[in-house]
Image (tube, rainbow, N blue to C red):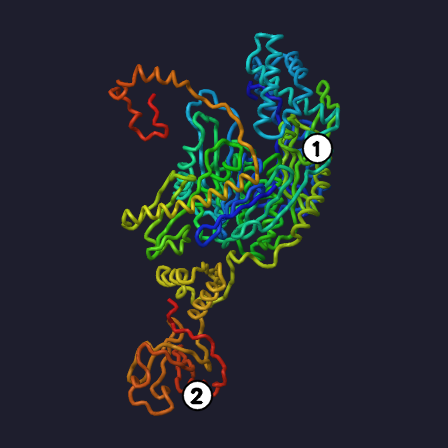
Amino acid sequence: MSDIPFKGPFGAVRVGRVNGEFIANPTHAVRVHSDLDLIYVGTENDVIMIEGAANELPEADFVKALEFAHGHAREMIRAQKELAAQVGKPKREMPLLSVKPELLEIAYQVAGDRIEGALYTQGKVARSKAVQALREEVKAAMLQKYPEVDDFAISQAFDYVQKKAFRVSVLEKQKRMDGRGYQDLRQISCEVRVLPRAHGSAIFQRGETQALALATLAPIEEAQMIDAYGGGEQSKRFLLHYNFPPFSVGETGRFGGASRREIGHGALAERSLEPVVPSENDFRYAIRISSEVMESNGSTSMASVCGGMLALMDAGVPVKDVVAGISVGLVTEYDNDQLKRYELLTDIIGSEDHFGDMDFKLCGTAKGVTGYQLDLKLPGISLKILSEAIQRAKEARSKILEIMRSTIDKPRAELSKYAPRIETIKINPEKIGALIGPGGKTIKGIVAETGAEINIEDDGSVHIYATSGESMARAKEIIGGMTREIEIGQTYQGRVVSVKEFGAFVEVFPGRDGLVHISELADFRVKRTEDVAKVGDVIWVKCIGIDDKGRVKLSRKAALRERAEAETGHVPEPAHDGAGR
Amino acid sequence: MQHKVTAQIGANSISIETGKIAKLADGSVIVSCGETMVMASAVSATTIKEGQDFFPLTVDYREKAAAAGKFPGGYFKREGRPTEKETLTSRMTDRPLRPLFPQGYFYDTQVISILLSADGENDPDILSMNGASAALTVSDIPFKGPIGAVRVGRVNGEFVANPTHAVRVHSDLDLIYVGTENDVIMIEGAANELPEAEFVKALEFAHGHAREMIRAQKELAAQVGKPKREMPLLSVKPELLEIAYQVAGDRIEGAPCPTFHSKGRSGRCE
């Protein structure tokens, strides 16, 4: 519509799938039931970008979804063209920066057959020198023929040399820069439990790309809240954060907050793994993976998927299946805007991404597709090429899955001893108030004493999180004690809280006491209550009745008799002296 | 190729490994003590930026929450701005390294250390300092180190090398000492009214342990056997400097020069 030169329009559409039926631009309400989230952007005839995730969607259905999407993208294009025709604004004619083809060819003749050798020189300093020397040669040759060339032309020409050499190598010599065949994966190795304190950890190495993934389990209350102004989920309990420090490529640079690229790569890896993460009901944890890229030569996001997967299994997360991901690249040759030939490259390295035409990343399980992302440098490719790339990715994925499974084939049965344990006990909902205490005082006291975290739901479910068995047991004991009912016929150890003429009040559980009548204090006649029970004494009592007002009648006499009978080494249940707060 | 050395410092040994992770950095190591692990990397550019007139060295230490089995606190469950501990450790790692690069070495240089595992007892700051030095030492980056870093505490009058947090509670000294083979290069810390004579003894005690860390790093570098890169250094002929001094030397102090007294990082007078 504007007068800015633009070879569009393109059309964008979201496709979901509910009960096997594709739906164009589903609402958030519909998407909850969808097993596919495909964002598709197409030009008139080609696909230009896709992104999204699916719930292990078989490849054949995925391709059908792309075809379905394309029809809707065209409709968006038609509407935009109609609008532009109505507006009728001509495009502005602007001078474009370019370098004469002759100049580019001079550069290629000088350096074309040596550039690969220079780019693959061993050692950073030597490589930098070799490339720099070649650049100087190119510059000298260009200046000799055309003394007026500027820095822009030289740098464009040098870039052209590299790009053309790469294309000639792949298409003519059928040789990739590192000597691999088109469909070969780089050497892959995996290792788990590399860090002693992380709840799960793994190294995934593919050639010169290395991701160190750390998995952390936390109470589900630590899930990330989301300001979803545009609708959708309000919180996320599975997070994957991706970090790409500059040393991973052997360079100096910015180090700190997450860049757009880092957030995008993390999101791709996150949605690729999310379909196999167990539901909240099966695994009441928030899970965070941080993928620290330690080495990078292409496709660190896919290494983060594989590393993250291994770290999840290492952490003992009961995942539903194993996910892996791989990139597929593309090199094309055009003749007058007609595609003459192309080659797909499996597992592209950094320079194949840089000089090639496509970076397509596809993740999934043995069953089907999860996360994916397509970036192109061309103004579109046909769905046929994309379908072939999907097939390539699938073949590579099954090989990677095999390697990953040979390292760890299923989630560990036990969580790390440093991971929080979660146990849920049920209490009478009427007791919730007592457990929380005035202003949360009681519950805070328990948290402080035990080191456990405690969350209470309205139905009386109490979730206790603790990092040690000891802390878990103590928290359970206190909560159990506070919320337990005194039962008739049971014997307890309690503390005398007040003494009256007619008997003693004994606190059996915190906040729960009963009366031992003077006649029940001992099996002899007690003159004064104080003779047997003083405030603060801890004595054994048996509950002999609860009246209709809930008042508890206790007997020390009956408890002592019972204990005397059981004096055969039977250990009574652990004493609770009421000091739990 | 993976290599590993160990140094015995106080009750705990410290190991330094290289060749396993971050192999595209010019130098990288993992330093471990107990179950605390810090990775350190060093990278230096091969060209000098045009107009560069100071040594652009950046040193960063960062902690990963996952290292301690935690989610990062706060609303965003992501490591954000550096904490005070991270900034202080970055500075402590930076200060002893800075004087050990050749004069006129103006190549962009970056040292990054990351806490990967934290046992809550062995403080990662000492590992970050030794790791940064080790990463530079095994790399081909020109560096006049290694340096050795050690923390010294004092409990019941006895010095303790690299005390754990549990021990530090009872300590009346917290000395962070960084030394080269024969000299001290940085100290920092606090003490509970420690008499000066004792303080000097603590420094002497520390130096022995710093040397052990240096020994280990040299051993590692010998195993790796990477020669230092030869890089042209930027320098100005001494005659030129002397001409400048002859012209302005006896009048410069009188000239108003606002940056001269400021605490700017370069303290240069422009």
Front tag of 1 and 2: 1
Placement of A419 over or under A428, stated as above or below: above
- Disc 2 sits on a residue from what chain? A
Q: Position of residue A474 (x, y in %)?
A: 45, 66
Where in the figure is residue A46, as x and y percent of width and height? 68, 29
Q: Residue furthest bottom?
A: A524
Residue at disc 2, secondary structure: helix
Amino acid beneath label 1: Leu
Q: Secondary structure at mark 1?
A: strand
Q: Position of residue B254 (x, y in %)?
A: 24, 20
- Is B55 in front, or is A386? B55
Compared with A367, A6 (above or below) is above
Report the residue at 40% width, 64% height from top. A433
Q: Write the residue at 66% across / 11% down.
A: A102
Earlier-in-chain disc, 1 versus 2: 1
Mark 1–mark 2 Cα distance, whole angstroms, equals: 85 Å
Q: Can residue A75 be seen here?
A: no
Q: Is residue A560 above or below residue A321?
A: below
Q: Which residue is mark 1?
A: A345
Give the quarter of the image for residue B96.
top left
Name the amino acid, label 2: Arg
* Dot label at residue A568: none
Chain holding disc 1: A
Q: Quadrant of residue B266?
A: top left
Of all residues, the one furthest to the front in this rendering is: B182
- Circle 2 crowding by C-alpha within 10 Å: few under 14, some 14–19, many from 20: few
For the residue pair A74 and B100, the one nearer the viewer reads as B100
Quarter placement of the N terminus of chain A: top right
Write the residue at 62% across / 53% down. A319
- Tell me the tag on residue A561: 2
Please check whether the numbered discs 1 and 2 fall on a single chain: yes
